[in-house]
Amino acid sequence: MPPLLQSLIATLALAAVPLLQAAPLNATLVVEADKPGPRIDPNIYGQFVEHLGRGVHEGIWVGEGSPIPNVRGIRSDVVAALKRIKVPVIRWPGGCFAELYHWRDGIGPRDQRPRGVNAAWGDEPETNGFGSHEFMDLLEQIGAKAFLSVNLASGSTAEAQTWLHYLTDPATSGAGAERARNGHAAPYAVPYIGIGNENWGCGGNMTADYYADQYRQYLSVLRPFGTLIATDANADDYAWTETLLKRALYRHSRSTPLAWINKQPQLAMMSLHFYTFAGDDWDTKSPAVGFNETEWARSLLRTQKMDELITRHTAIMDRYDPARQVGLAVSEWGTWWSADPKRPSNLYQANTLRDAVIAGLTLNIFQDHADRVRMANLAQMANVLQALILTRGAQMIVTPTYHVFDLYQGHQGAKRVPVSVSAPGYRVDDVDLPSLSVSASLGEGGRLTLSIVNLRANDDIRIGIDLRGVAARTAQGRTVTAAAMDAHPDFDTPDALHPRPLAGLALQPQRLEVTVPAKSVNVIEINP
Ligand code: AHR
């Protein structure tokens, strides 16, 4: 071929590349709104707060004398932000911190509370200024429910029992009178009680058999107080779940210790902990910002493992509890990026578009397992790991993860409906992912909520949606997206990644067409 012609062809080919890239990929969805399934428990949008870094001190608690606007020492900007997204439940005081926590250190006049160090997290000073009353006040200000984690590693059944008496007894009892003297006559509600934290690790380094027996002992003391949640299986430790259910799910006969004598479950939920980083190695996690597409893809692949974990733990639960009376509480989940070398134990990290996509993917997985997953708690609410809220002194910003929780509010309490997805796959190096994650629910008045995550870093996707069982009249969508994978808000640019309207929705009564941008979380609300 003559050189001139060759170079002309090459130039034309190069010019065509952007055109080809610009054309969106195509996908189709079938949403079966005529087949509503289980209710999506609002508690799956729950939060986790631990005394760790600035998670409590500064992130929530500034004290009554602070120049930062507060109500009884709890910062008002944080409360307003959390109320807006209807945070349903908060787990406290940890985490590993809970396994070293003694509740008496955190009651009574604040200037007389013992000052200590947080031995679970870098020996940082712990003032005990934020204790049980302050936690309950936070919940009241937000309108959320309490999930207390009791201490097995350095505590006792007696300590846990007196804590629950102190919080929940009437003021006419001795324990209730002490609470009243400390400023709160009315009993508090403690609907959820976690029996320990990671008892295979920081919570006492126990074997599954030993923990199951501990659970039975705590159960006999704490049963009257609330819904009991057994401690967390470590990710894919299926043997833990098997042993726990075998030894502790039902009451056993006196003569044959492991023969069940009835089929009333003795635990309302068992929990699971799982964190996301790029790959599966805790020692090479990926930085929070400044990562490449391979790390992006490896992080999303790891996130997707949540689906496998829930499916496999559920399969074990199904053998012991086929009626599905027992729920799964994913009481710690979220991203865990490389630590700040200057202060490794504070677990503060930037929150980027990647965190938003991971939040959307994970919430879609929880929703799709609504028949078992009855609670989940993002780690952690403020200033720690995949936080909703970041603070710098008096300044506060909400993160891309917060925006996803905001967008997903329409799913709270709605009924999950089946969706089938037909879309091309997404391959990055040796990582194979789907391009889309989709979840749908039917709420009050026939409102259909669709959450669609586009995992692809570089491609928009044009989606044709077949809407079965609805006569749609209106559709509105919002999207969280940006040009860069690691785009993130900062204290000087707080609105980066604020949700924007999703443009170009074409609606007919039983069909919707939409283009979802590359690397985005989208929620569309369709009303009859
Ligand atoms: O969320 C941080 C820590 O992660 C918690 O304290 C612990 O339970 C888990 O290992």
Image: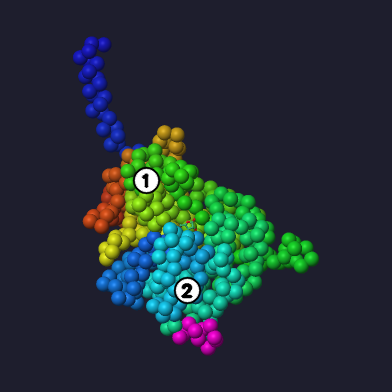
The number of numbered badges drawn on the structure is 2
Give the vertical position of 517 relative to 334 (above or below): above
Q: What mark, if any, has residue 105 been given in the picture?
A: 2
- Report the span colored magenta: 171-181
Q: Quadrant of residue 293?
A: top left
Q: Quadrant of the N terminus?
A: top left
Question: Which mark's residue is nearer the viewer, 2 or 1?
Answer: 2
Give the vertical position of 416 relative to 3 (above or below): below
Q: Residue at x 44, y 59 (%)?
A: 121
Question: Is residue 65 something one can see in this rendering?
Answer: yes
Give whichever of 210, 364 is nearer the camera: 210
Q: What mark, if any, has residue 287 been given in the picture?
A: 1
The three-letter amino acid code for the residue at tag 1 is Pro
Give whichever of 278, 156 is nearer the camera: 156
Q: Residue at x 40, y 65 (%)?
A: 125
- Secondary structure at badge 1 equals loop
Question: Is residue 517 something one can see in this rendering?
Answer: no
Whether residue 67 sits left or right of residue 271 in the image: it is: left
